[in-house]
Image (cartoon, rainbow, N blue to C red):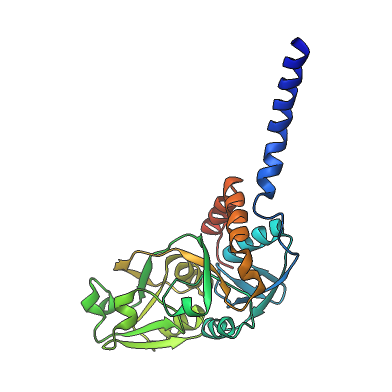
Amino acid sequence: MRWIALKSGLAGMLMLLWAPLVLSQQGTETVEPLTVTVGVDHSPPYRIIEPSRKTGLYLDIFEEIADRLGWRVEYREAPFRRVLLLMRRGEVDVMLGPLRTEEREEFMTFVAPAFPPERRLFFYLNEQNRIERYSDLQGKTIGILEGARYFTRFDRDQTLKKESAAHYENLMKMLQRGRVDVVVAPELVGQYTLRALGIEASISPFFVPGERSWIAVSEQSPARKYAEDIRAALKLIEREGIRENLVLKYLEQPAH
């Protein structure tokens, strides 16, 4: 009886030792070793695409996920609006950071809200362009990113004068030159871009709460059938504290 008890205790200890390994493989053990092409626009600190490096908060999080799935990642750079078109055509597999909309759901699967929500802020230089309430946007020239979505009322408002550009760097330079009165941008990318350009802009008291940004997969991509595995890998890096550490890294990182 004592031998049986010892044997049962040993089995229990082995199960405890094996549990982390089993959990680490859960949901990923049948994943094919794919090469996935990620469509990205240069939008630091989310997506930093330079000749010497490809990094940023969104890329680093996805690389951790891909590593656990055994996937090889390639990047194809294009402006935000063109990345959406490439997703529609199935010419890239994955997009990092789009907001979920009904229109986009027609050609991409929103797999996981992997990235933290950020407020939409209104940046200005001249005090007369300070935005206290939504109605203050009337009569202003507002800089927006091509193809981006901010919030429903604003996106659909045809009475507002909006000027678009391919990158937030372009928009902030337009603000500096007086070509736009206000730039609307997610909090982190807006402040990061201003620091990088050395522009001292002010932030309006009016803002819009942010939404979670997603990992999305093209409807035409073979990676689409592994949506559950992507979610399982994301949960694993969250449990390991990796996702939180990456978010803090970029929140604290100075602009280059």
Residue 235, horizontal then vertical, whole percent: 57, 51
Instruction: Write the residue at 55% across / 86% down.
Output: 85
Residue 82 showing in the rendered view: yes
Residue 45, horizontal then vertical, whole percent: 55, 67
- Where is 146 relative to 202, above or below? below
Instruction: Write the residue at 62% across / 67% down.
Output: 225
- Where is 112 relative to 240, above or below? below
The quadrant holding residue 201 is bottom left
- Where is 97 relative to 25, above or below? below
Towards the viewer: 200 or 48 = 48
Towards the viewer: 101 or 130 = 101
Instruction: Write the residue at 55% across / 61% down.
Output: 254
The quadrant holding residue 132 is bottom left
In-image side of 128 versus 104 (left or right) = left
In-image side of 30 versus 218 (left or right) = right
The quarter of the rendered structure image containing the C terminus is bottom right
Instruction: Write the residue at 71% across / 77% down.
Output: 51
Residue 52, horizontal then vertical, whole percent: 72, 73
Residue 126 showing in the rendered view: no
Looking at this view, name the residue that lies furthest to the right: 3
